[in-house]
Image (tube, rainbow, N blue to C red):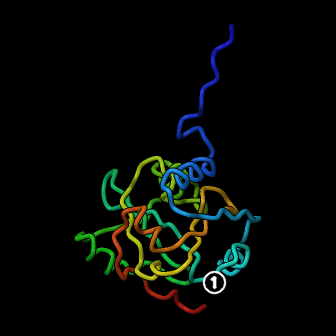
Amino acid sequence: MSEPATQPGPAESSGEERAAQALAASGIAHRVVHHGRVSSLAEAAAARGVEQDALIKSIVVRRGEDDYLFVLVPGGRTISWPRLRALLGVNRLSMPDAATAKDVTGYERGTITPFGSLRAWPVVADERVLGREVSIGAGGHGVGATVDGTALVAVLGATVADVTDPEPAT
């Protein structure tokens, strides 16, 4: 007699599946967009049909031992470390290496999203996420979810603040 089939656990299912399930469970209206791998912000925005500043990067930040958070950063912007530290009331923050980021979220860099993360880490969203349509990663390379930014912040229970600066011109 064969064993009954089991569903994969969170660490065993694909990141894209976890993100899709979490998006559906959140109740947020969303549209998933699949595209090939991209090599720039401009390519990703074009592939997802949004402006570059509407492409939201989910950045994992380490606050302390086994204490992480997501920071939602609009395209073309970078974290303002002094403002983020002040908001969180800490003197030191860091970005984990790629292996640690995967261990604490279940996602490899370039696919990270709060939706379906292995742990529900706190979320800080830059204030520029609000009031418009945005695209956030959906757990796989070349996969994004287009959502209303205000609804995104609400379903994630995110703290909203001005925590980014424009990226330096190259």
- Hey, which residue is sitting farthest left in the picture? 89
Q: What amino acid is labelled 1 in the image?
A: Glu
- Front residue of 33/101: it is 33
Q: Which of the 4 quarters of the picture holds residue 95? A: bottom left
Q: Position of residue 85 (x, y in %)?
A: 29, 74
Mark 1, secondary structure of its residue? loop
Q: Which of the 4 quarters of the picture holds residue 169? A: bottom right
Residue where numbered disc 1 is placed = 51
Going 49% across and 88% down the picture, which residue do you hit?
166
User: Horizontally, is 66 left or right of 71 in the view?
Assistant: left
- From this view, report whether residue 30 is shown above or below residue 44: above
What crowding class fits label 1: few (fewer than 14 Cα within 10 Å), some (14-19), or many (20 or more)? some
The N terminus is located in which quarter?
A: top right
- Hey, which residue is sitting farthest bottom in the picture? 169
How many marks the image carries: the answer is 1
Q: Position of residue 31 (x, y in %)?
A: 64, 64
Going 35% across and 75% down the picture, which residue do you hit?
160
User: Horizontally, is 30 left or right of 71 in the view?
Assistant: right
- From this view, report whether residue 69 is shown above or below residue 51: above
- Hey, which residue is sitting farthest right in the picture? 36
User: Horizontally, is 68 left or right of 101 in the view?
Assistant: left
Q: Position of residue 33 (x, y in %)?
A: 69, 65
Going 26% across and 77% down the picture, which residue do you hit?
86
Going 65% across and 56% down the picture, which residue do you hit?
140
- Front residue of 89/137: it is 137
The C terminus is located in which quarter?
A: bottom right
- From this view, report whether residue 146 is shown above or below residue 3: below
